[in-house]
Image (cartoon, rainbow, N blue to C red):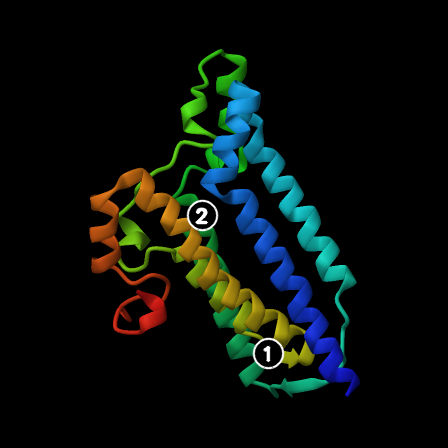
Amino acid sequence: MRETFETFVIILLFSGFGIIHSFLASLEIKKKLAVVIKEKIAFYRIFYNIISLLLFLAVYEMSPKPQIMIYDLPEPYDLWILGLQMISLVFVIAAGFSVNLREFLGIDQIIRYFRNEYDPNELDEKYEFKKTGFYKYTRHPIYFFCILFLGLRPAMDLFYLVFFITMTGYFFAGSYFEERKLAELFGEDYTQYQKDTARIIPFLKFIKGNR
């Protein structure tokens, strides 16, 4: 009974994080804020990243940690899985470098602001429509490799399993709202890209949740 309650709390906390994270990332919020603060919207991205990180850490710390072991792989299987996890981490980093990291972090926006070069119509970042590299196979390669990295665990307890399932659900739900924004920005070109390319899991366009 206690483990059931703790599982519910974990899901509730991380789902709450996902809702807040997606809400703050929405175009509607940014557009309304830009009307008020104008060019200072350039600072929103770095604010968003800092708040998101602090909120995630707070949620992680507040979550119950039921110490029920789901599995603990023996040697050499644990080393194989650990090796695959490290490979997936390399791909997370590689996928991250395929985007403009300075723009993603919010650094370039602040530089443009102090140079008096910032266009408030950009809102908090210059969005890019990428179809090359990893993006030929999945519309969200960073999400895909993060799911692999989080899921490839030599040992799994109840807390981490619930955390992993909840975060995977958030990647799929969050990608939906993110793509609404991209479709609004890039129009028919992006909607065609959605039809041609799997959402998260490469090559599996026939899976309804992956379209």
Residue found 53% across the figure and 73% down from its top? 152
Assign the C terminus to one quadrant of the image: bottom left
Q: Tell me whether circle 1 and circle 2 mark residues in contact (CB < 8 Å).
A: no
Amino acid at the residue labelled 2: Gly
Q: Is residue 201 visible?
A: yes
Question: For this rendering, which residue is in front, 56 or 33?
Answer: 33
Residue found 51% across the figure and 24% down from its top? 35
**Residue ID for mark 1:** 154
Cα distance, mark 1 to mark 2?
A: 25 Å
In screen coordinates, is 30 left or right of 58?
Answer: left
**Residue ID for mark 2:** 96
Residue 161 at x, y percent in the picture: 61, 76
Between tags 1 and 2, which lies in front?
A: 2
Q: How many numbered circles does the render carry?
A: 2
Question: For this rendering, which residue is in front, 58 or 97?
Answer: 58
Assign the N terminus to one quadrant of the image: bottom right
Residue 27 falls in which quadrant of the image?
top left
Question: For this rendering, which residue is in front, 31 or 94?
Answer: 31
Q: Secondary structure at mark 1?
A: loop
Residue found 38% across the figure and 36% down from its top? 127
Residue found 28% across the figure and 40% down from its top? 186
Residue 151 at x, y percent in the picture: 53, 72
Residue 36 at x, y percent in the picture: 56, 23
Residue 53 at x, y percent in the picture: 65, 47
Amino acid at the residue labelled 1: Pro
Relative to 200, is 75 above or below? Answer: below
